[in-house]
Amino acid sequence: MSDKLKFFPIQLFAVIMGISGLTIAFAKAYHFLNAPYFIYEGLLVIDTILFFLIFTFYIYKWLKYPDEVKKEFNHPIKSSFTATISISFLLVSIAYYDYAPTISIVFWYIGVALQLYLALYVIEFWITKEFKEVHMNPAWFIPIVGNVLVPVVGVDAAPIFVSIFFFAMGMFFWLVLFTMVMYRIIFHHPLAKKLLPTLFIFIAPPAVGFISYFRITFGSIDMFSMILYSLALITFILLVFAIKIFDFKEFFISWWAYTFPLAAITIATILLYSAYHTELLYWFGYVLLSITTIVILYVTQRTIKAMNEHKICIEEKE
C-alpha cells in the first residue's frame, strides 16, 4: 500500500475532470434536452466521492512523500497536470451550481485561488526551465483551460472583471501554446504512444472558451462565440477522421484525456441548441452525449481492469 501511495499519479485528477464533465453535460441535457434528472444526480454523487478519494490520497502522498510530489511539480510533462487539481475544484463547483449553490461557491473560491497559483507556477516553470521539443504536448493546454473555466460560475460569484481577467489570460496563452504545440507535432518526432490521447485536449480550449463566453455575455451568441464553437467542432471532426492513429489496445492513464474534451464540446453544443432550438443541434447534442458517455464508461472499465492488474500507482519509466 505504501508503494502504491508513493506512486499515486497526479494524472488521476483527470478522472475527476472526465466524470465532472459528464455530470455537467447531463445537467445541461436535463434542462434543454429533456434527459432524466436522476442520471445527473447519480453522476453528481459518483463525482463527489471520486473527488474526495483522489484528493485525499494525493494530500496524504504529499504529506508522506513530499519529494515525490515535488518531482511531479518539476517534471517537464507531469507539471502541466498540476492544474488538474484546481480544475477539479472548478468543475465540481460547476457540477453543483444548480443543485447546491452554496457548496458550489465554496469549491469555486478554493478552485480560483489554486488555479491562479498553479497557472502562474507552470508558466514561470516554462519560462525558467530548459525543455526539449519532445517535452511539449497538448497536455500543456491544461493549466490554460483552467483559467477559461473560472467565469462559468464566476459571473455570479464575483465582479465581472474577475471573469474577464481569467478568460483573457486563458485565451491569450491558448493561442500562444497552440502555435508552439502544432509546430512541435508537425516538425518534430511523433508523440509517444501514451501521449497520443492528449491530442483530444485540442478540443477543450475553444469548447470551454465558447461555454465561458456564453456565460460572460449572459447567453449571447455572436460571431466570436461561433468561431470558438466552430474551432472546437473542426478539431473534433479532424480527430474522428484520424481515429486510426489512436491505439486502443494498451491502456494508459492518459486515456482520460479523451473524456473532458468530449464533455466540453457536448456541453457547448447543448448550450448552442438552447439559443437556436434547431432539430439538428438537438440530435447532435444527443449524439455527442452518447459518445461521451460510452467513452467514459469504456475508459472507466479499462481503468478498473488496470487497477486489478496492478498497472496503476507503479513507478513509471521515464
Image (cartoon, rainbow, N blue to C red):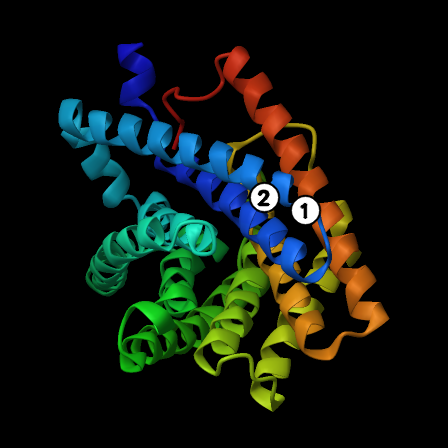
Residue 122 in percent (x, y) is at 26, 57
* Identity of the residue drawn at 27% across and 39% down: 72
> 284 or 11: nearer the eye?
284
Which residue sits furthest right? 279
Of marks 1 and 2, the one in the foreground: 2
Screen quadrant of the C terminus? top left
- SS at mark 2? helix
For label 1, the crowd category at 10 Å Cα-Cα, with few meaning under 14, some 14 to 19 and many 20 or more, is many
Residue 27 in percent (x, y) is at 58, 52
Residue 166, quarter of picture = bottom left
Residue 40, numbered label: 2
Q: Type of residue at label 1? A: Thr
How far apart marks 1 and 2 lie (CA) works out to 14 Å
Please indicate, yes or no, whether residue 194 appears anywhere in the rendered image: no
* Identity of the residue drawn at 54% across and 31% down: 252
- Mark before the other along the chain sequence, 1 or 2: 2
- SS at mark 1? helix
Residue 16 in percent (x, y) is at 45, 40
Verify CB contact (< 8 Å) between mark 1 and mark 2.
no
Residue 188 in percent (x, y) is at 53, 59
Screen quadrant of the N terminus? top left
Residue 144, numbered label: none
Please indicate, yes or no, whether residue 297 appears anywhere in the rendered image: yes
Check the image and report above or below for 283 versus 39: below
For label 2, the crowd category at 10 Å Cα-Cα, with few meaning under 14, some 14 to 19 and many 20 or more, is many
* Identity of the residue drawn at 48% across and 34% down: 45
Judge left or right: residue 279 versus residue 61. Answer: right
Residue 292, numbered label: 1
